[in-house]
Image (cartoon, rainbow, N blue to C red):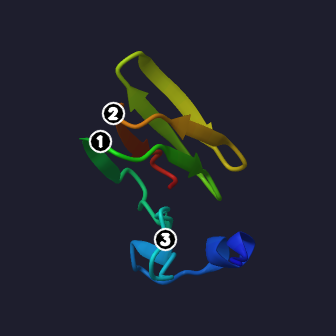
Amino acid sequence: MCDTDGLRRRTASRRRRWRLAEPGRQLDANVVRIPPSGRVDTHTEPDLDVLLHVLDGTAALVCADGERALRAGLLAWLPHGSARSVVAAPTG
């Protein structure tokens, strides 16, 4: 299990806050921090769907079919093969 509220409150500068580390899994999961005005460049996950869960702050999810506003509490499902990027707001 993972307490995502506790991860949200951490102030360390590390980008990756948590990682699913169990061996033999068919799922990958990470909790990452994007600094204010930071970004995750456009990329495509060819094999796995991605579930994006926003813990804190605001950002924009940029996909082939447009841009969507992200805020704390939102979940976004990104099917495998879809290109996307994430751009954090100036406040993080």
Q: CA distance from mark 2 to mark 1?
A: 5 Å
Tell which of 16 and 2 is nearer to you. Answer: 2
Q: Earlier in the sequence, mark 2 or mark 1?
A: 1
Q: Percent position (x, y) of residue 34?
A: 42, 60
| Residue at (51, 82) in percent of width and height | 22
Q: Residue at x 47, y 63 (%)?
A: 26
Say which amino acid is labelled 3: Arg
Could you tell me if the residues under marks 2 and 1 are in contact, i.e. CB atoms within 8 Å? yes
The reply to whether the C-beta atoms of the residues labelled 1 and 3 are less than 8 Å apart is no
Tell me what residue is drawn at x 50 percent, y 65 percent: 29
**Tally of numbered tags:** 3
Q: Residue flagged by tag 1: what amino acid is it?
A: Pro
The residue carrying mark 2 is 81
Q: List the residue tagged with mark 3.
A: 25
Q: CA distance from mark 1 to mark 3?
A: 17 Å
Mark 3 → mark 2, Cα distance in angstroms: 20 Å
- The percent coordinates of residue 66 (x first, y second) are 42, 18
**What kind of element bears circle 1?**
loop
Provide residue 76's location: percent of width, then percent of height: 59, 38
Chain-order first, disc 1 or disc 3: 3
